[in-house]
Image: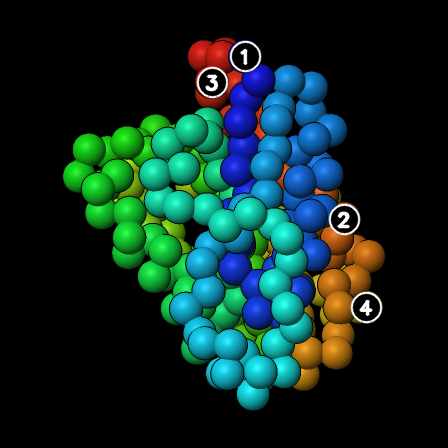
Amino acid sequence: MATKLYIVFYSTYGHVEKLAHEIKKGADSVEGVEAKLFQVPETLSDEILGKLSAPPKSDVPIISPNDLTEADGFVFGFPTRFGMMSAQFKAFLDATGGLWRTQALAGKPAGLFYSTGSQGGGQETTALTAITQLVHHGMIFVPIGYSFGAGMFEMEKVKGGSPYGAGTYAGDGSRQPSQLELEQAFHQGKYIAAITKKLKSGSA
């Protein structure tokens, strides 16, 4: 049976979703891994989204909490709000109480990726504060560390991401993920897919 990796995200303006698609490409490059994209439900009204000039949602399917039990591993992605995950993703996790009660997700690996508005906007704190969600579920946090190599030490160009996971900077919304940021996202997908596969097969 294929190892199932679910890439679950929330994206307001599309930056996180772009990283998610690249993470899926990386995961798909690992033989025997089946990666799927999901987005969590929106909590804002169409009126509010319109005032925010948010684009329409993509056709990526909406996930429900119980769908998580079907996966062998996860990569969760979200934009930051004041240095923490967005309320939409937190609301989704708040709805996983039933899974927490039975520890249905315990032992499953999970990685994190994110987008912030500025260089001091939470590239590390957003991931760091999100780890508590994984801990209470008994999931295994899988950071990328410095496995991305020289790309982790880029100093000449603006680059999101950290040892916690792939990331990008949205700025005022006009900036899109750079090629280096997309490469890091691809690496994260490939990296966590391989680890998830090992854990499932018991060969880790």
Quadrant of the rendered image containing residue 14:
bottom right
Q: Tell me whether the residue at label 2 lies in contact with that at label 4, contact meaning CB atoms closer than 8 angstroms.
A: no
**Comparing labels 1 and 4, the label whose residue is closer to the camera:** 1
Distance from Cα at disc 4 to Cα at disc 3: 40 Å
The local secondary structure at tag 3 comes to helix
For the residue marked with disc 4, what is the amino acid? Glu
The residue that label 3 is drawn on is 200
Quadrant occupied by the N terminus? top right
Mark 4 Cα shell of 10 Å, populated few (<14), some (14-19), many (≥20): few
Which labelled disc corresponds to residue 1?
1
Residue 88 point in image, percent of width and height:
42, 65
Residue 155 point in image, percent of width and height:
76, 65
For the residue marked with disc 1, what is the amino acid? Met
Mark 2 Cα shell of 10 Å, populated few (<14), some (14-19), many (≥20): some
The relative height of residue 71 versus residue 115 in the rendered view (above or below) is above
The local secondary structure at tag 2 comes to helix
Q: Tell me whether the residue at label 1 lies in contact with that at label 4, contact meaning CB atoms closer than 8 angstroms.
A: no
Distance from Cα at disc 1 to Cα at disc 2: 28 Å
For the residue marked with disc 3, what is the amino acid? Lys
For the image, the number of numbered tags is 4
Q: Earlier in the sequence, mark 4 or mark 3?
A: 4
Which labelled disc corresponds to residue 156?
4
Q: Tell me whether the residue at label 1 lies in contact with that at label 2, contact meaning CB atoms closer than 8 angstroms.
A: no
Horizontal placement of 109 versus 162: left or right?
Answer: left
